[in-house]
Image (cartoon, helix red, strand yellow):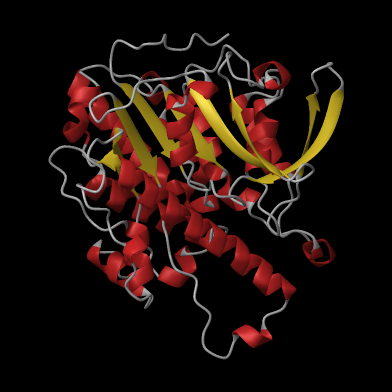
Amino acid sequence: MLNITPNPPTRPMRLLSIDGGGLKGLIPAEALIAIESQLDALTGRSLPLCDRFDLIGGTSTGAILAVGLALGLKAVELRDFYLKFGKQIFHKVFLPERFWHSYPSSPLEEHLKDIFGEDTTLGSAKLRTNILIVAKNVTLGTTWFFTNNPKGKYFTNNRGLPLWQIVRASSAAPTYFPPQTISVPDDQGQPQDYEFIDGGVSSYNNPSMQVFLEATDPKYQFGWPTGASKLLLLSLGTGFNAITVPAGKASGYNLFNWARYAIKELMNDANLQQNVLMHLIGQPPAGKAPAPTAEANAARASGVPANDALDFISPGAVASKALTYQRITVSLTRERLDGLNLGDIDPAKVGEMDAADQIGNFQRIGQAIAKEEVRMELLKQFYV
């Protein structure tokens, strides 16, 4: 069983949150490689990121990265998961079946079993740090937060669930993949079958706020202290682009068009909302100037009018900050890609989470944003 950090902790606590976004998971994967390398250099010790973060949360593709890290995999191994298997996973089913979903579940399931272990459970001692995985239980109409905290309210019920099933559930984006059925024991030990879909079909495609609450709200049984010097949260995004419909085209959209549009815009709006809230309660790393969020920049670049919710919250808006917070993501707009010297990349093509033909470009974007944004020397006090 996982030995969680005692309360109160004797050092600052470190949290990591990773968004959903399909193959765009290559973007945070490259950031993770840079974070790992820079921390090794700063501390003089080579350690996997499970030994650098006390709680790692993820939704959808972020769940794949979060669980992989918690099992002790190196960031480069997880990056290579996308490079090796991305095209297999996002290989379309035959036409009649596309009425229900675009991609088969079996390739994703098999690769998750291979990388995590078919018999590895949520309560496994193989997990070397605390995790939080978001999935949507459509049978009950509720969002579930799977955690391996042995003090958690539902840990007894969930501890025996296979990790690959939980991650597969978190990744089951409607219209892309079929739902995942998980048999969960009730309080009497009787199995109850529930169907789950992607955790991104909720307010938690960016799970930063829930990761923060999990760590600090006493009801979640960690109860770690808050304060800019006591708590760090790194939030990694998968890129953002406002979804626009050309004038006169919306009236011709069919049910499938609107389903795709609704999923993407829900994720975009949730990402923006979560980031604004986290900026409100958190302060940027020392030495890093406040700046508009990448999500806000993308919205403005698409012609969205000025809006207070799109602006970086003034550092004085909340007198006492609850944590140090850094968001690392990228606006997938023409202007931003040009600024990263990626003028040959079509922003419309890399805006699609299932664009298997853009895997190389997702990696290039991730490398560019990691080089620009990952500055772990600004967070040295949390690690040495």
The answer to which of 145 and 198 lies nearer the viewer is 145
The answer to which of 183 and 325 lies nearer the viewer is 325
Figure disc tally? 0
- The residue shown at (18%, 24%) is 381
Q: Position of residue 68 (x, y in %)?
A: 51, 29
The answer to which of 58 and 105 lies nearer the viewer is 58
Quarter holding residue 51? top left
Q: Position of residue 130 (x, y in %)?
A: 49, 21
- Which residue is outermost to the right? 190
Q: Is residue 297 above or below residue 61?
A: below
Query: In the rendered view of the protein, which quadrant contains the N terminus?
Result: top right
Query: In the rendered view of the protein, which quadrant contains the C terminus?
Result: top left
- Which residue is outermost to the bottom? 248
- The residue shown at (32%, 64%) is 308
Q: Is residue 72 above or below residue 204?
A: above
Q: Is residue 351 visible?
A: yes
- The residue shown at (60%, 26%) is 116
Quarter holding residue 120? top right
- Which residue is outermost to the left? 287
